[in-house]
């Protein structure tokens, strides 16, 4: 498929995974990030939290990049109502992975779109992920790869974290970090991109 756009689109994300996924649309875009304090967002529900963080990122970039379409995103892992952010060290990574072991959790990605005129659209994609009942030895071996430290929940489904996963229900790319099909549908409906 070939999508077209006459818009100047900015992806407000430092994530290499989001950049790679967004590039699949084969439309021109630039990347610009802003330093925001995600800890300033109060957590009432996982859905509200990721929406607010995605908007925080997008709004910060929109101030620096006027008259452009800004797309910001945030992904979090929720075990019940507890958010499991990117682990800061091996002990926290192990704690996250042990909390997920043998259970189903949810990966939520919010995408915020700010148009040139300031109109904002935000949606949340939610995917259920069930982990296998794996050993501590396997968790430690995975942590030793260094992979958990830049990923919400402490794992990457697109890397060796796949060995921890029993099944998923929902959008696989959402777990990677960007629900591309839903984003494409939204961009088409807003006529930001066309066929």
Image (spheres, rainbow, N blue to C red):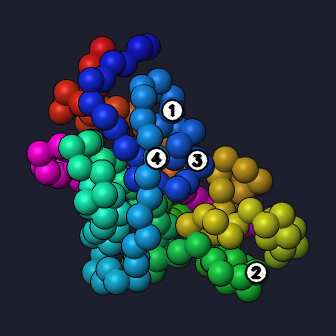
Q: Residues within 10 Å of mark 1 (few under 14, many from 20)?
A: few
The mark nearer the N terminus, 3 or 1, is: 3
Asked if residue 5 is positioned above or below residue 43 in the image, the reply reads above
The mark nearer the N terminus, 2 or 4, is: 4
For the record, the magenta segment spans 112-134
Q: Nearer the viewer, residue 145 or 22?
A: 22
Q: Main secondary structure of the magenta part?
A: strand
Real-space CA distance between mark 3 and mark 1, rounded to the nearest whole angstrom: 10 Å
Q: Is residue 143 left or right of residue 173?
A: right
Position of residue 56 measured from the top left corner of the image (x, y, whole percent): 30, 67
Inspect this view and state whether residue 101 appears: no
Tag 3 residue: 17
Quadrant in which the C terminus is drawn: top left
Q: Closer to us: mark 2 or mark 4?
A: 4
Tag 1 residue: 23
Name the secondary structure under disc 2. helix
The mark nearer the N terminus, 4 or 1, is: 1
Position of residue 171 measured from the top left corner of the image (x, y, whole percent): 46, 42
Q: Nearer the viewer, residue 162 or 176?
A: 176
Q: Residues within 10 Å of mark 2 (few under 14, many from 20)?
A: some
Inspect this view and state whether residue 8 appears: yes
The mark nearer the N terminus, 1 or 2, is: 1
Real-space CA distance between mark 2 and mark 4, rounded to the nearest whole angstrom: 30 Å
Real-space CA distance between mark 2 and mark 3, rounded to the nearest whole angstrom: 22 Å
The mark nearer the N terminus, 2 or 3, is: 3
Q: Which mark is residue 90?
A: 2
Q: Nearer the viewer, residue 22 or 153?
A: 22
Q: Residue at x 63, y 77 (%)?
A: 87
Q: Closer to us: mark 1 or mark 2?
A: 1
Residue 191 lies in quadrant:
top left
Quadrant in which the N terminus is drawn: top left
Tag 4 residue: 31
């Amino acid at each position: 498929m070939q999508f077209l756009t006459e818009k100047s689109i900015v992806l407000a994300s430092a994530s290499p995974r989001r950049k790679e996924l967004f590039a699949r649309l084969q439309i021109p875009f630039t990347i610009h990030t802003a330093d925001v304090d995600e800890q300033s967002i109060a957590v009432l529900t996982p859905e509200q939290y990721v929406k607010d963080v995605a908007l925080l990122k997008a709004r910060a970039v929109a101030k620096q990049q006027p008259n452009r379409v800004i797309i910001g995103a945030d992904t979090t892992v929720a075990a019940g109502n507890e958010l499991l952010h990117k682990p800061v060290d091996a002990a926290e990574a192990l704690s996250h992975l042990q909390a997920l072991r043998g259970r189903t959790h949810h990966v939520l990605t919010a995408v915020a779109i700010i148009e040139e005129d300031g109109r904002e659209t935000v949606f949340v994609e939610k995917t259920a992920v069930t982990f296998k009942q794996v050993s501590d030895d396997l968790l430690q071996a995975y942590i030793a790869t260094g992979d958990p430290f830049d990923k919400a929940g402490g794992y990457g489904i697109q890397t060796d974290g796949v060995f921890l996963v029993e099944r998923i229900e929902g959008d696989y790319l959402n777990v990677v970090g960007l629900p591309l099909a839903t984003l494409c549908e939204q961009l088409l409906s807003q006529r930001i991109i066309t066929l």
